[in-house]
């Protein structure tokens, strides 16, 4: 994209009301199927339900403790790495790097924790099925924070301020608990905080609701390029098959034709390893630290089936605020949204198993269509989210 | 005392009871008289309630609740254990008014059309109130669906029910609180009358069966069943104790009779009510092959992409023979060459009836549900198209 085009997009997004009619009278119209497909990507935000597996979900005391712990480097074994080291609020709770880096370099890109509460599975491989479990994983991971349950329990025991906040949140002095129970509590408080991170309304949401209400004037405010990109997204691009619903993900795992060799020449097994780790995890929705082992999510996840196609499959990421979380894909190998659009446009079919799912195929988009698709993805950006 | 405090105490009691319950395999029991009403589910969430029932060693539990939502929640958690019975009450406190309230008949008719039940009850009905239009309609609905009536009634009301429909099947709650000789008179007169022992203590003490009751048990070994009657939430914490108490006096009867009362009579009544007759295999989505007929129904009725759902399945064997095999279910998107990412589990809930859990369709479009009936002679495969919106 030339700087001039880039500027134009910025103007389109920033001052939508200055635009002439887009949806009406521009030749871009929707069939009944397309209309239904567009409407299915909302409304936003969805209904917020507390997480039954986390008894402090939504509680103020836990949220305050979680917010503090999120920025607490002493949770790591060296006292140097906090959640916020990698999930940086000014970078949309990602880190802007291709691959994460904690105490050691990581092999995966750091995803945002915006909208984390809507996941069924966490991490690129879905090794955990609870937000609180996904918040414990980095604390114990040798490459990230390399701590232990004893280390975390020791920190809370030694710091009266933290201990007091823990007692406010859970009604029990952390010193009276086993280390793994303290760690589970820390995960649940971190989760309670992250649950508050729900992104705001976007230009797309405005358009989608206007379409639902048949409000032509409001529809006209949506940038024309984004509108054409949206048509590709729900139409010939078939993007909505995987990036579905208000969150733009089906929450499952797929092969989008991205290499899964790591930089050291090893293979990132993706979902295959994820299911194996999930089955071993003591922090899963049906594990003993869960507060509702028979909830709807835990009831589904325990039915998960390991398949050959899981090898090298990665989570279908949400696309909300995607413009703010470059670089892209599980290994950060695509620098920009243009690169992603070009990747799908010229996808290498030889990378996809011929007997496997036949959904992706080269779209051979024109340069203008690529720009349109990117304009659509940019219209998924919310104003208030940093 | 605040709700949370009561709740805390109840949890402690439950924990203590669960901790003392014997770990060894217990002889199976069925409990024909469980209620799980709104105040119970506030105190004891469905998963915990099921834990209590399993801890008590129950094979089957007949559950009826005010409102029916309680029964549905428990059934969703443990379809193999819970035998749903439809209580004609929306909330506690309708025991003395329901039979004059025409909207009750409509509610019962609607729910019967929507869900599967083994019976209607437990309702409270005495004397000539049984002649009123609402109870008459209930008796007709039970006949229409081939299910029993669970009546907390005096002998007079029970006789009036049988006068309306001699073919009705009635489970007499608390054996009418009648003495054993009077119960025997009724059982002799009506061969489709069963009797539950809920909230009765006179028939046994210190593990010994009372001689007058023993006579009736021996004369009617196929007609009695156990019951706890969890009419207030606190009584949920008595289920385990009551089961242990029942096991002691049942052991004082001849083995066969003891086992009948322990669970076989209840199981037989449930199986009769939940049998897969032609109508069960003909409602919902239906298909047939090689004389086998299968019907299924989604829970919730409209499934959503990306959301877990369950399935009720009914199978009928050729020539109206009972289906005794197993069922497997899966789903695939033929055009995409992939299936589901989850492997559903299928539990048998009654003869020819199954409940599948762990299903989720992760894309919109054309799916195919595949059913495999594992019969004695081979596998019968059935398929159904489904468009996921
Ligand atoms: Zn009763």
Image (cartoon, rainbow, N blue to C red):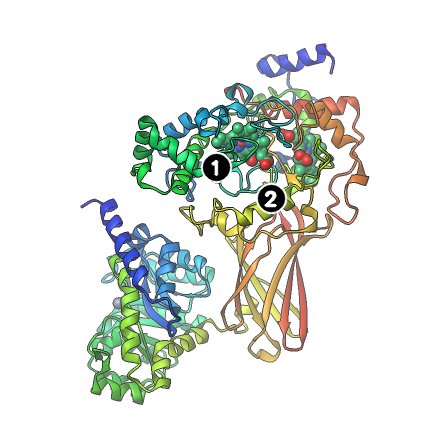
Image mark count: 2
| Residue A13 against residue A343 in the figure, above or below | above
Q: Which mark is residue B347?
A: none
Question: Label 1: how many residues lie within 10 Å, few (<14), some (14-19) or many (20+)?
Answer: many
In depth, the one of B136 and B263 nearer the eye is B263
Residue A310 in view, yes or no: yes
Q: Which residue is mark 2?
A: A274
The quarter in which the C terminus of chain B is drawn is top right
In depth, the one of B306 and A193 nearer the eye is A193
Could you tell whether B281 is left or right of B42 in the image? right
The answer for how far apart the CA atoms under marks 1 and 2 are is 15 Å
In depth, the one of A194 and A368 nearer the eye is A194
- Residue B258 x %, y %: 34, 82
| Residue B241 against residue B376 in the figure, above or below | above
Secondary structure of the residue carrying numbered label 1 = helix
In depth, the one of A44 and A122 nearer the eye is A122
Residue A113 in view, yes or no: no
Could you tell whether B159 is left or right of B367 in the image? left
Q: Which mark is residue A136?
A: 1
């Amino acid at each position: 994209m030339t700087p001039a085009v880039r500027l134009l997009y910025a103007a389109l997004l920033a001052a939508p009301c200055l635009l002439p009619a887009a949806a009406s009278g521009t030749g871009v119209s929707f069939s009944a199927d397309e209309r239904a497909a567009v409407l299915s990507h909302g409304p936003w935000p969805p209904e917020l339900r507390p997480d039954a597996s986390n008894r402090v979900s939504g509680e103020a005391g836990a949220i305050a403790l979680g917010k503090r712990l999120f920025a607490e480097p002493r949770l790591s074994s060296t006292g140097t790495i906090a959640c916020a080291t990698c999930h940086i609020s000014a970078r949309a709770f990602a880190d802007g790097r291709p691959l994460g880096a904690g105490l050691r370099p990581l092999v995966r890109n750091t995803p945002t924790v915006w909208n984390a509460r809507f996941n069924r599975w966490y991490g690129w491989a879905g090794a955990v099925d609870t937000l609180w479990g996904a918040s414990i994983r980095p604390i114990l991971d040798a490459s990230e924070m390399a701590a232990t349950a004893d280390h975390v329990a020791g920190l809370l025991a030694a710091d009266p301020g933290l201990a007091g906040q823990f007692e406010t949140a859970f009604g029990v002095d952390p010193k009276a608990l086993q280390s793994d129970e303290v760690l589970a509590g820390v995960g649940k408080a971190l989760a309670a905080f992250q649950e508050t991170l729900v992104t705001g309304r976007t230009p797309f949401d405005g358009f989608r609701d206007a379409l639902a209400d048949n409000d032509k004037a409001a529809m006209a405010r949506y940038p024309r390029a984004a509108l054409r990109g949206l048509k590709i997204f729900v139409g010939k691009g078939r993007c909505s098959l995987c990036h579905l619903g208000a969150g733009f993900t089906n929450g499952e795992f797929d092969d989008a034709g991205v290499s899964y060799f790591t930089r050291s020449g090893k293979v990132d097994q993706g979902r295959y390893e994820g299911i194996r780790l999930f089955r071993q995890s003591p922090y899963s929705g049906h594990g003993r630290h869960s507060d509702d082992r028979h909830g709807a999510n835990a009831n589904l996840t325990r039915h998960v089936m390991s398949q050959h196609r899981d090898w090298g499959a990665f989570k279908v990421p949400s696309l909300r605020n995607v413009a703010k979380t470059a670089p892209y894909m599980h290994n950060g190998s695509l620098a920009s949204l243009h690169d992603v659009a070009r990747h799908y446009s010229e996808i290498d079919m030889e990378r996809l198993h011929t007997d496997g799912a036949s959904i992706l195929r080269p779209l051979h988009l024109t340069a203008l269509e690529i720009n349109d698709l990117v304009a659509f993805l940019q219209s998924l950006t919310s104003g208030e989210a940093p | 005392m605040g709700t949370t405090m009561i709740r805390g105490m109840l949890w402690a009691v439950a924990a203590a009871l669960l901790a003392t319950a014997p770990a060894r395999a217990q002889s199976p029991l069925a409990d024909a008289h469980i209620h799980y009403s709104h105040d119970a589910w506030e105190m004891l969430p469905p998963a915990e309630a099921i834990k209590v029932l399993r801890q008590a060693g129950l094979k089957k539990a007949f559950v009826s609740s005010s409102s029916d939502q309680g029964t549905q929640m428990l059934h969703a958690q443990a379809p193999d254990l819970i035998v749903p019975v439809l209580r004609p009450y929306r909330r506690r406190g309708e025991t003395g008014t329901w039979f004059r309230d025409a909207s009750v008949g409509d509610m019962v008719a609607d729910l019967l059309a929507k869900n599967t039940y083994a019976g209607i009850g437990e309702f409270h009905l005495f004397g000539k109130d049984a002649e009123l239009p609402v109870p008459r309609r209930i008796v007709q609905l039970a006949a229409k669906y081939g299910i029993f009536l669970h009546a907390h009634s005096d002998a007079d009301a029970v006789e009036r029910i049988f006068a309306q429909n001699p073919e009705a099947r009635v489970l007499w709650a608390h054996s009418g609180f009648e003495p054993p000789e009077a119960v025997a008179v009724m059982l002799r007169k009506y061969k489709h009358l069963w009797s539950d022992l809920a909230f009765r203590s006179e028939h046994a003490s210190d593990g010994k069966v009372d001689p007058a009751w023993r006579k009736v048990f021996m004369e009617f070994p196929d007609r009695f069943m156990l019951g706890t009657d969890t009419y207030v939430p606190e009584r949920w914490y008595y289920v385990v104790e009551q089961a242990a108490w029942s096991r002691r006096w049942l052991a004082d009867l001849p083995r066969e009779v003891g086992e009948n009362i322990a669970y076989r009579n209840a199981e037989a009544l449930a199986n009769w009510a939940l049998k897969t007759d032609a109508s069960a295999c003909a409602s919902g989505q239906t298909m047939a092959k090689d004389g086998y007929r299968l019907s299924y129904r989604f829970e919730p009725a409209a499934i959503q992409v990306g959301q877990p759902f369950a399935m009720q399945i009914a199978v009928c064997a050729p020539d109206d023979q009972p289906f005794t095999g197993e069922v497997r279910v899966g789903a695939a998107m033929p055009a995409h060459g992939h299936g589901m990412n989850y492997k559903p589990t299928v539990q048998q809930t009654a003869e020819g009836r199954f409940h599948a859990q762990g299903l989720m369709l992760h894309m919109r479009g054309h799916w195919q549900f595949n059913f495999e009936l594992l019969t004695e002679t081979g596998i019968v495969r059935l398929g159904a198209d489904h468009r996921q919106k």
